[in-house]
């Protein structure tokens, strides 16, 4: 487990893991060491087969994350490749990942949220990626992620025009999946956790993987059939149908 004073803090309780970005004085931005710690937390979560849902959030009520440390970008200690290692790892997590956006997102922080499956935002938050304003060409994997998940027009508004998007617009363009008042964020997050936790972890992981592959346009039919067959062989389908007949909560196997 991570130290409570660390810039990234991990906690795991039963089927739920939480990663807290814990540097509010710097708008929860990430240094190179912070990225390494974040990735280590993700690896710990992935290794725990009891975990069915991961929640990623930030400390404070102002900013979820301001992305990579600008100081380290200036010094050369932070690179686009370093940041891509984190975003690719977060995207690859097998369980559903909820981003509880406690505040605004800037720079790479907006992509960290975009790597998650569900994004719960709060009224008053904003998004801005100032890459073009400082002469930084956003990494290709990141651009691909924006285009794939939001469409080329919205991606250009965010990356090319460095436009500021408010919470209502973020919900409209599909960046946010939920939008609530600040004091409702924890409750709404818990409700979504409660919805996801009882589901078959094997089936959820498979369908998450297939959704992402379809969105990427690289779906392999043979691999798809193997994944779906694995779900059926896992016994979760039999248990789910039996539980439905017996009017009880299914007891699915560990992930």
Image: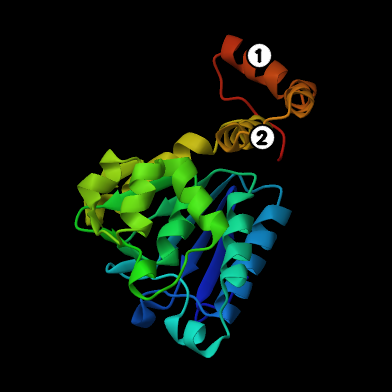
Task: Give neighbour class at mark 1: few <14, some 14-19, many 20+ (Cα, 10 Å).
Answer: some
Kind of element beneath mark 2:
loop
Residue 108: x %, y % from top left: 45, 65
Residue 161: x %, y % from top left: 30, 59
Residue at 69%, 61% in the rendered image: 43
Indicate which label's residue lies in the foreground, 2 or 1.
Answer: 2
State the residue position of label 2.
Answer: 218
Residue 148: x %, y % from top left: 49, 42
Quadrant (top left/top right/bottom left/bottom right) for the C terminus: top right
Label 2 – label 1 distance at C-alpha: 35 Å
Residue 169: x %, y % from top left: 23, 46
Mark 2 / mark 1, whichever is N-terminal? 2
Position of 73 with respect to 1 (left or right) is: left
Regarding residue 48, the answer to whether it shows in the image is yes
- Extreme residue in the bottom direction: 75
Residue at 61%, 71% in the rendered image: 82
* Foreground of the two, 194 or 42: 42
Regarding residue 193, the answer to whether it shows in the image is no
Task: Give neighbour class at mark 2: few <14, some 14-19, many 20+ (Cα, 10 Å).
Answer: few
State the residue position of label 1.
Answer: 242
Residue 36 position by quadrant: bottom right
Q: Are marks 2 and 1 in contact (CB under 8 Å)?
A: no
Position of 35 with respect to 46 (left or right) is: left
Q: Is residue 141 above or below residue 30?
A: above
Residue at 44%, 72% in the rendered image: 136
Q: Which mark is residue 215?
A: none
Residue 201 position by quadrant: top right
* Foreground of the two, 243 or 66: 66
Quadrant (top left/top right/bottom left/bottom right) for the N terminus: bottom right
Kind of element beneath mark 1:
helix
């Amino acid at each position: 487990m991570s130290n409570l004073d660390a810039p990234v803090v991990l906690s795991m309780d039963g089927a739920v893991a939480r990663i807290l970005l814990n540097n509010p004085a710097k708008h929860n931005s990430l240094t190179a060491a912070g990225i390494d710690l974040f990735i280590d937390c993700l690896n710990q979560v992935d290794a725990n087969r009891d975990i069915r849902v991961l929640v990623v959030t930030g400390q404070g009520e102002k900013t979820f994350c301001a992305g990579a440390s600008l100081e380290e970008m200036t010094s050369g200690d932070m690179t686009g490749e370093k940041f891509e290692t984190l975003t690719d790892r977060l995207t690859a997590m097998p369980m559903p990942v909820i981003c509880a956006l406690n505040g605004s997102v800037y720079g790479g922080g907006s992509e960290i949220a975009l790597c998650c499956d569900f994004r719960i935002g709060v009224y008053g938050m904003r998004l801005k990626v100032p890459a073009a304003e400082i002469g930084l060409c956003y990494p290709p994997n990141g651009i691909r992620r924006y285009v794939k998940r939001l469409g080329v027009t919205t991606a250009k508004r965010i990356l090319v025009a460095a436009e500021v998007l408010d919470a209502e617009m973020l919900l409209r363009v599909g960046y946010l999946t939920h939008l609530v008042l600040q004091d409702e964020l924890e409750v709404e997050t818990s409700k979504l956790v409660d919805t996801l936790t009882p589901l078959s972890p094997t089936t959820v992981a498979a369908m998450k993987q297939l959704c992402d592959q379809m969105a990427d346009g690289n779906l392999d039919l043979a691999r798809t059939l193997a994944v779906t067959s694995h779900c059926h062989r896992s016994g979760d389908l039999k248990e789910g149908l039996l539980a439905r007949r017996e009017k009880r909560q299914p007891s699915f196997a560990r992930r």
